[in-house]
Image (spheres, rainbow, N blue to C red):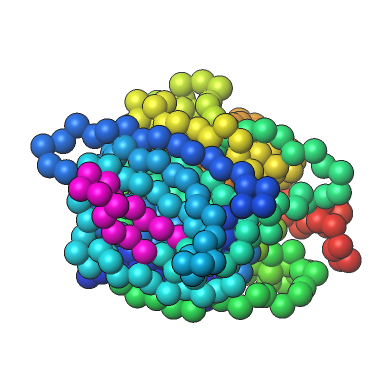
């Protein structure tokens, strides 16, 4: 599958799904535990733990446990027991579910300096326990994502998330949760990526939305969102390559499907300084047009933004409203102010450059909504909605390569301005 990913993917592949392993350590010294509770699913058959997927480097790991259907679960920790040769552990107990035979009692070794392995088995007749064996202390949080149901564990091996600039106060802003997960099981383990070389270049992660089986929004004449945002992402990367003080990567560089939780994990694992998710808007009203840029928040300012977030998240609005948010988001909250600064810079620049050609483009401004792709980002992160593909005039603009270039120019201009204004400590640009 052709796409840009970091070398640190750790996969566990039972046969047709992507199940993987791991997680960097959990906080025991100053242990910060974020327990959550799921909801028992109403189903004629038991949910099945069919996959575990993990993305890791030496300071961060995201583990996704896929059950498809909602389950009742509880997360906790256990201290090391040297006499029994047991390391510190994070464990998740899942009630009322079955487990794929290829996962049961088959530990996957990681040994990346943060955790040793991930293993799963029956704790009792009603409970499956997934255990992450750690190598050193770290903080972590656990939350669940619906449709299909999955339990996500984020672990920070550094014990804290450094802010992008000194003396910037962290803001409290809990995360949202949900994503598209693969529906095939699998088993495979690869070594984590080594620590990236020390560099003063600003690392930018571009995330062209949708892809593969997910076309995104479709215009009146059949133009697909997934194709437009990929084209814009490639243009931004090509233009940014002219700036030696920036390094640009993409979550995908071809027409492939990537689950939302993986996109955020790729950015975190690669230690990106900026995360920009690229999208095109749509509305039931064919008259609506304009550009807007979003940051993550628990809710939305109006019904239209809530419906947009639900569409981008791949869940019904009712499911989006029912998602439980973590009380203290140690990743997203600390970046809220910087994300707002970045979002305004990008939105104003796109509006200016996109309006320089075939007429003025409406500026819908800076907004907030619960976009799952931004949940857990360790860096300033935004989601750009460039035009409305549902509007015939704007769909025509999105078919024009020159106009896409103007959108790309705005994004490049904004990223360069933001990255060069001393936002990141230690930068000598």
State left or right for residue 35 relative to residue 100. Answer: right
User: Does residue 365 show up?
Assistant: yes
Q: Quadrant of the C terminus?
A: bottom right
Residue 314 is situated, as x and y percent measured from the top left of the image, at 36, 41
Residue located 45% across and 60% down the image: 132
Q: Residue at x 72, y 78 (%)?
A: 197
- Determine whether 41 is above or below 222 in the image: above
Instruction: Please count the marks in the image.
Output: 0
The reply, left or right, for residue 84 in relation to residue 413 is: left
Q: Position of residue 222 (x, y in %)?
A: 32, 48
- Decide which of 214, 404 is in the foreground and name it: 214
Quarter of the N terminus within the rendering: bottom left
Which quadrant of the figure has residue 60?
A: bottom right
The question of residue 122 being in magenta is answered with yes
At horizontal 86% and vertical 62% (from top left) the residue drawn is: 426
Q: Please, what is the dominant secondary structure of the magenta stretch?
A: strand
x and y, in percent, of residue 404 in the image: 55, 54
Q: Which residues are magenta?
A: 119-132
Could you tell me residue 18's position as x and y percent?
Answer: 32, 64
- Specify the farthest residue to the left: 44
**Residue shown at the point (25%, 63%) measured from the top left:** 104
């Amino acid at each position: 599958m052709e796409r840009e990913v970091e070398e640190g993917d750790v996969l566990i592949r039972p046969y047709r799904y992507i199940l993987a392993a791991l997680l960097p350590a959990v906080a025991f010294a100053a242990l910060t535990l974020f327990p959550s509770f799921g909801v028992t699913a109403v189903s004629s058959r038991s949910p099945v733990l069919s996959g575990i997927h993990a993305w890791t480097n030496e300071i961060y790991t995201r583990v996704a446990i896929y059950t498809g259907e909602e389950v009742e679960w509880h997360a906790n920790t256990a201290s090391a027991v040297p006499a029994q040769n047991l390391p510190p552990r994070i464990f998740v107990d899942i009630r009322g579910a079955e487990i794929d035979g290829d996962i049961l009692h088959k530990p996957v070794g990681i040994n990346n300096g943060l955790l040793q392995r991930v293993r799963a088995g029956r704790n009792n007749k009603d409970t499956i326990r997934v255990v992450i064996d750690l190598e050193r202390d770290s903080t972590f949080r656990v939350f669940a994502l619906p449709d299909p149901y999955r339990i996500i564990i984020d672990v920070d091996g550094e014990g804290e998330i450094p802010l992008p600039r000194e003396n910037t106060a962290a803001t409290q802003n809990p995360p949202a949760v949900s994503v598209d997960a693969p529906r095939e099981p699998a088993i495979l383990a690869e070594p984590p990526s080594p620590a990236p070389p020390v560099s003063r270049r600003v690392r930018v992660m571009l995330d062209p939305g949708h892809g593969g089986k997910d076309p995104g929004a479709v215009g009146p004449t059949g133009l697909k969102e997934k194709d437009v945002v990929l084209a814009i992402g490639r243009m931004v990367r090509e233009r940014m390559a002219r700036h030696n003080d920036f390094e640009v990567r993409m979550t995908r560089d071809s027409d492939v499907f990537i689950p939302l939780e993986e996109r955020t994990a790729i950015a975190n694992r690669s230690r990106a300084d900026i995360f920009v998710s690229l999208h095109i808007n749509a509305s039931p009203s064919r008259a609506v047009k304009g550009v807007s840029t979003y940051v993550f928040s628990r809710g939305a300012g109006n019904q239209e933004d809530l419906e947009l977030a639900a569409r981008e998240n791949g869940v019904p609005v009712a499911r989006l409203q029912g998602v439980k948010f973590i009380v203290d988001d140690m990743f997203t909250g600390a970046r809220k102010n910087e994300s707002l600064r970045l979002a305004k810079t990008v939105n104003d620049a796109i509006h200016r450059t996109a309006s320089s050609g075939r007429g003025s483009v409406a500026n819908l401004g800076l907004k907030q909504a619960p976009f799952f792709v931004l949940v857990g980002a360790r860096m300033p992160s935004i989601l750009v909605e460039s035009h409305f593909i549902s509007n015939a005039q704007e769909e025509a603009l999105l078919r024009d390569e020159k106009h896409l270039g103007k959108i790309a120019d705005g994004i490049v201009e904004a990223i360069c301005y933001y990255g060069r204004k001393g936002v990141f400590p230690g930068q000598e640009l």
